[in-house]
Amino acid sequence: MIGIVINSSALKESLVAKGIKPTYQRLIILDHLAGNRKKHLTAESIYKALHKKTPALSLTTVYNTLNSFAEAGLASAITITGTEVRYEFAATPHHHLLCKECGCIIDIDIQCPNARRGTIRGYKIDEVHGYFKGTCKACLKKQRKHP
């Protein structure tokens, strides 16, 4: 499902501001990310969702576009699983929890002194990733019901 109207001037402006030409395919991919802010999507899931309505869209285009978005700061690439990259619409730096039971990735809102980009002890920090692995609330609830 596409979240924001594709012709949104805000989407176009955000691409142009980052030096990315606002093609139709880039706009629908960015729109899909923006419309699924709480989800951590794979390139394949984005492709499957958008290919139905845009058959000319290729998986390679989705991968290349997501990489461009990540490099430009429009999207964040999350490599918490070790086997795949998930993407989310760029947000303020935050941590993630990977549920080892159901595989979902959840945003974790905690105060971390290292979460801000900048410098630490004279080093220039470009990215900070905080990953936790454990069990999500929903899976814990299921475990309590069926021990």
Image: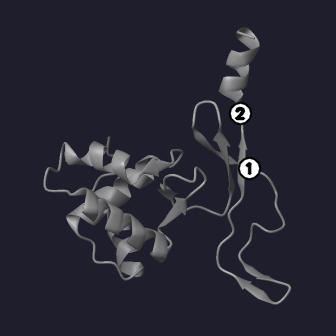
Mark 1 Cα-neighbour bin, 10 Å: few <14, some 14–19, many ≥20: few
Which residue is the site of mark 2? 135
32 and 67: which is toward the camera: 67
User: Looking at the rendering, which quadrant does residue 30 occupy?
Assistant: bottom left
Q: Identify residue type, mark 1.
A: Asp
Q: Identify residue type, mark 2.
A: Thr
> Residue 3 appears at what percent x and percent y?
36, 46
Which residue is the site of mark 1? 109
Name the side, left or right, on which 58 lies relative to 47: left
Can residue 3 be seen here? The reply is no
> Residue 127 appears at what percent x and percent y?
65, 73
Q: Nearer the viewer, mark 1 or mark 2?
A: 2
> Residue 36 appears at what percent x and percent y?
45, 46
For numbered disc 2, what is the local secondary structure? loop
74 and 134: which is toward the camera: 134
What residue is shown at x 43% (from left), y 54% (from top)? 34
Quadrant containing the C terminus in the rendered view? top right
> Residue 112 appears at what percent x and percent y?
82, 61
